[in-house]
Image (cartoon, rainbow, N blue to C red):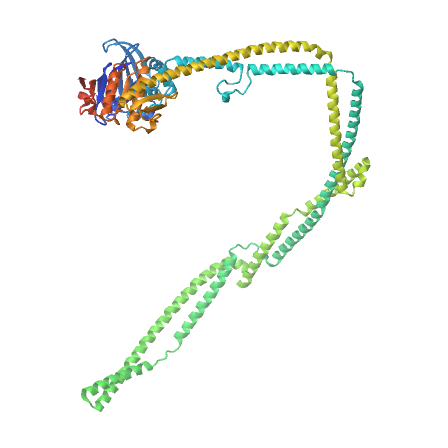
């Protein structure tokens, strides 16, 4: 298969991209980072195989809203084709093209081909993929022909091994499965893995068991013939012993049953009699509790009956009424005291007036002395000051008394208002509690309320005790039933003692009764054991004597059946040996073919790896799981994990190149490399490009890279640009390099 043209209408950042590829030369796509190189490679793979997941489909949608569509034109062994896929609807159209032109010769397929479904159209499209590539999954394309960015590491899956080696290994597997299926029908043993041993027997094991069973039957028949004699006397003796043992066992069983019945009757009587005192005590307690409740009801009705329908708020109202009455009395007393103080004559105090007069007399006298220094003038001034002070003091006293009287009257008004408010509240409370006062004092009713509450609580407790006990009538009925049951049990016991006189000595000694029951149980068990042994002896005798001449006549038929089964077993064992030999030879052949195949791949990869590393690594070997072992001139068995990232990339490129050459034997698939030279130095980059140019002569090689320095190492290539400023004009531009 060789890709001729890739057209992308919209895929991620790519829009209206169109590029023609060369089938026999290295195709080199160069573009800066984020220019769409990886999107181009993904568009090519997704156009052919579809998206494996919804997440990858969403990530690949065009950034600028362009139509999500792409087409790939390629040539295969069966002709030239163009695959066009609309990713939104998964609509795929496959057209066969005429040689050398883009003209459509015929339409091969058209329908919805979503790899995430299993529709009939998808299955039809997978048949086309299988004819072009040999597989139908994009995963195998990535493992073999497509190296996306930073994913050089290669894991060779079993499906890829079958593809690389062709159909030979698959044919070996089919042959081995057919041989194993035939072997499984013969035996449950597995020739290569003991853990795969089947659980159920197969033909050989079943036949061996049948032969052993026939031989056992023949041995038993011979034994019967040799032991067959007249043993009537022995049979009579055995039967006689059996009759005696059965009679003894029946007697012991009857005695044991009578003893157990008697013990059961005694136990029932004991339980009933044990219950009788408890019933009497409960009856006394119940009657006492009922009397106590009745007394309390009578006491409450006689002394506190008027509080029978009193609500819970009565006690609170009574306490409130008492406090309000006390408060009203205090307010009334305070009012009376205030009125007496106002009505009393006001006492005029002259002390203040005299004090003011003396002060003014002193001031006027001192002023006159300092003014004129005459005693008469000083005395006159003092007399005038004293008179003026008396006048001022009396006026002040009169004003203060008037103010005190006004304050007293205001206080009286406040007290009267309080008395009126408290009286209204007292009236409201008295309306609620008046039915319970009835001439009683509040203190007496309040005390009766407390006594009534306590009496009611005590009565509830007594009633709870009464309800927890059965009623006296019920207890009396139960007592009567117990008496009747005890009488019935005693009559049964009397009848049983009459039938079994040996129980009489045990009547007053429960220990002896228990010992007797245990002894009877042991004796019955011993008799039962002897009886079973004698019965087995009789059965054995009957088996020995019952075969007769019929078993003797079957010896010949048993011999014939054994011979027939042994002949068939011999044939099956020979078939098993032949199948085991065939499986061993087939397995050796497959292993030899795989070693040859893996060795061929290792040789091709070794040549490429030696060239990429400039001869540093001289040897490369692969085991059956394609795990490599490397060697240099100085070191053997160098593990791949110890190499640098660039050296590991060189190995995986060598392995991919070898796989591509192996796949080319069936259908040459293109090798698509998305920037695999990120960890290569200048020298190895040159070696790699040389290898790719040579490989391009065998299979188509497409290399996408951002490194323009590769142009310095390319001798002949078909170079195309990706990600220019004008995609519609410059994307896919071609540069021919020939040196």
Q: How many labels does the image show?
A: 0
The one of 514 and 122 positioned closer to us in this rendering: 514
Q: Position of residue 339 (x, y in %)?
A: 41, 72
In the visual, does 173 lie left or right of 104?
Answer: right
The one of 4 and 572 positioned closer to us in this rendering: 572
Q: Residue, x 48% and y 59% (percent of image)?
A: 429
Quadrant where the C terminus lies? top left
> Can residue 89 be seen here?
no
Q: Is residue 480 above or below residue 249?
A: below
In the visual, does 214 lie left or right of 116?
Answer: right
Q: Position of residue 722 (x, y in %)?
A: 21, 23
Q: Residue, x 65% and y 14% (percent of image)?
A: 215
Q: Position of residue 607 (x, y in %)?
A: 30, 19
The image quarter in which residue 590 lies: top left
Quadrant where the N terminus lies? top left
Q: Residue furthest front?
A: 634
> Can residue 601 be seen here?
yes
Q: Is residue 355 above or below residue 634?
A: below
The image quarter in which residue 474 lies: top right
Q: In this view, does 613 lie above or below 502?
A: above
Q: Where is residue 56 in the image (x, y as percent from the top left)?
A: 31, 25
The image quarter in which residue 24 lies: top left
The one of 626 and 315 positioned closer to us in this rendering: 626
The one of 314 and 29 positioned closer to us in this rendering: 29
């Amino acid at each position: 298969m060789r890709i001729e043209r890739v057209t992308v209408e919209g895929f991620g950042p790519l829009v209206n991209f169109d590029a023609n590829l060369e089938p026999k030369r290295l195709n080199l796509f160069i573009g800066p980072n984020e220019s769409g190189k990886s999107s181009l490679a993904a568009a090519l793979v997704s156009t052919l195989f579809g998206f494996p997941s919804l997440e990858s489909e969403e990530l690949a949608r065009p950034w600028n809203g362009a139509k999500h569509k792409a087409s790939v034109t390629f040539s295969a062994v069966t002709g030239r084709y163009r695959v066009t896929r609309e990713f939104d609807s998964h609509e795929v159209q496959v057209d066969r093209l005429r040689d050398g032109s883009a003209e459509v010769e015929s339409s091969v397929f058209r329908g919805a081909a979503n790899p995430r479904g299993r529709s009939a159209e998808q299955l039809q499209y997978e048949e086309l993929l299988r004819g072009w590539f040999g597989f139908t999954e994009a995963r195998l394309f990535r493992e073999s022909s497509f190296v996306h960015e930073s994913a050089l590491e290669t894991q060779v899956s079993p499906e890829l091994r079958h593809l690389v080696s062709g159909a030979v290994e698959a044919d070996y597997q089919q042959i081995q499965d057919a041989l194993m299926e035939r072997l499984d029908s013969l035996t449950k043993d597995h020739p290569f893995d003991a853990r795969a041993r089947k659980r159920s027997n197969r033909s050989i094991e079943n036949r061996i068991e049948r032969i052993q069973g026939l031989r056992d039957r023949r041995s038993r028949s011979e034994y019967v013939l040799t032991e067959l004699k007249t043993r009537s006397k022995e049979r009579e003796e055995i039967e006689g012993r059996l009759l005696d043992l059965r009679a003894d066992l029946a007697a012991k069983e009857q005695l044991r049953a009578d003893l157990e019945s008697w013990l059961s009757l005694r136990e029932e009587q004991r339980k009933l009699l044990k219950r009788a005192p408890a019933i009497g005590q409960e009856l006394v307690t119940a009657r006492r509790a009922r009397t106590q409740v009745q007394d309390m009801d009578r006491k409450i009705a006689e002394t506190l009956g008027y509080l029978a329908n009193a609500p819970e708020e009565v006690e609170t109202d009574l306490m409130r009424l008492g406090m309000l009455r006390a408060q009203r009395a205090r307010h009334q007393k305070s009012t009376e005291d205030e009125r007496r103080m106002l009505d009393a004559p006001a006492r005029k105090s002259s002390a203040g007036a005299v004090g003011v007069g003396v002060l003014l007399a002193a001031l006027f006298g001192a002023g006159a002395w300092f003014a004129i220094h005459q005693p008469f003038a000083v005395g006159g001034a003092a007399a005038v000051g004293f008179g003026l002070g008396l006048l001022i003091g009396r006026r002040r006293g009169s004003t203060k008394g008037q103010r005190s009287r006004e304050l007293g009257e205001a206080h009286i008004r406040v007290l009267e208002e309080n008395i009126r408010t408290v009286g209204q509240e007292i009236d409201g409370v008295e309306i609620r509690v008046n039915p319970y006062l009835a001439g009683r004092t509040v203190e007496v009713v309040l005390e009766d309320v407390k006594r009534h509450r306590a009496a009611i609580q005590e009565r509830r407790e007594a009633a709870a005790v009464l309800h927890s006990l059965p009623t006296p009538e019920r207890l009396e009925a139960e007592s009567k039933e117990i008496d009747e049951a005890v009488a019935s049990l005693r009559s049964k016991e009397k009848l049983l003692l009459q039938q079994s006189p040996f129980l009489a000595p045990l009547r007053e000694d429960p220990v002896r009764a228990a010992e007797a029951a245990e002894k009877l149980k042991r004796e019955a068990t011993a008799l039962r054991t002897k009886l079973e042994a004698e019965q087995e002896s009789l059965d054995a005798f009957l088996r020995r004597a019952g075969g007769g001449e019929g078993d003797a006549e079957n010896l010949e038929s048993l011999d014939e059946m054994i011979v027939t089964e042994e002949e068939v077993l011999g044939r099956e064992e020979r078939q098993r040996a032949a199948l085991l030999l065939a499986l061993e030879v087939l397995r050796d052949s497959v292993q030899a073919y795989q070693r040859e195949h893996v060795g061929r791949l290792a040789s091709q990869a070794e040549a490429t790896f030696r060239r990429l590393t400039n001869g540093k690594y001289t040897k490369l070997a692969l085991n059956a799981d394609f795990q490599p072992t490397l060697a240099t001139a100085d070191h053997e068995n160098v593990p791949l994990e110890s190499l640098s990232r660039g050296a590991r990339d060189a190995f995986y490129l060598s392995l991919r190149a070898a796989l591509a050459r192996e796949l080319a034997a069936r259908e040459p698939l293109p090798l698509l490399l998305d920037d695999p030279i990120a960890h290569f130095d200048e020298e190895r980059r040159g070696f790699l490009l040389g290898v790719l140019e040579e490989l391009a002569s065998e299979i188509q090689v497409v290399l996408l890279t951002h490194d323009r320095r590769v142009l310095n190492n390319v001798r002949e290539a078909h170079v195309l640009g990706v990600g220019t400023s004008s995609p519609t004009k410059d994307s896919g531009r071609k540069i021919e390099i020939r040196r």
